Image (cartoon, rainbow, N blue to C red):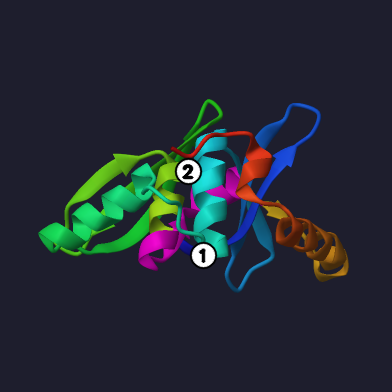
Amino acid sequence: MNELDVVGVRVEMPSNQPIVLLREVGGDRYLPIWIGPGEATAIAFAQQGMAPARPLTHDLFKDVLDAVGQELSEVRITDLREGVFYAELVFASGVEVSARPSDAIALALRTGTPIYGSDGVLDDAGIAIPDEQEDEVEKFREFLDQISPEDFGTNSQ
């Protein structure tokens, strides 16, 4: 397993499909995962430290975990089959629960939980970006700094 950081979310054109971009800590691979607009909004809210007037599903899940005294110890992106990514929520108690990566990432950002990607997933879907192409990633980060969750066209009620 390789630790991953969330670079951010953006809308891929021309399909208008949101993606979340993860970066391998201590490596040069990036992992793009296509996600839904609701999850894109949830991830963007968490990254920007925004608290909606009413809790989103991921905020509710975090509050429930806190209320029942469960700690999320890590999120693992474990597999990629037929173009579909799979993830697991791993709790301090040892319990593991299957999850969509987008939901797992949104929850991890709210709880400060580390995210890991399996070697197989990174080998299959990771994109190596050498240092000389890092300026393209910096442009992506600048784009992320200017985008807001409302740009994803979802209603967060």
Q: Is residue 70 found left or right of 144 in the rendered image?
A: left
Asked which quadrant contains residue 134, the reply is bottom right
Quadrant placement of the C terminus? top left
Instruction: Report which residue position mark 2 lands on.
Output: 102
Q: Is residue 113 magenta?
A: yes
Distance of label 1 from label 2 (alpha carbons): 17 Å
Report the magenta residues as a range. Answer: 109-126
Residue 105 lies in the magenta-colored region: no
The picture places residue 115, in percent across and down from the top left corner, at 44, 60
Mark 2 crowd level (few <14, some 14–19, many ≥20, 10 Å Cα): many
Tag 1 near tag 2, CB within 8 Å: no
Q: Which residue is rendered at x = 35% and y = 40% of the image?
A: 99
Q: Considering only vertical position in the picture, is 42 above or below 71?
A: above
Q: Which residue, given by chain and number where applicable, does mark 1 sit on? A: 49
Q: Position of residue 156 (x, y in %)?
A: 48, 39
Q: Three-letter amino acid code at disc 1?
A: Gly
Q: What is the residue that sits farthest to the bottom in this orientation?
A: 26
Viewer-proximal residue, 100 or 94? 100
Point out residue 105 in the picture as x, y percentages from the top left corner.
45, 52
Q: To which quarter of the image does residue 41 belong? A: top right
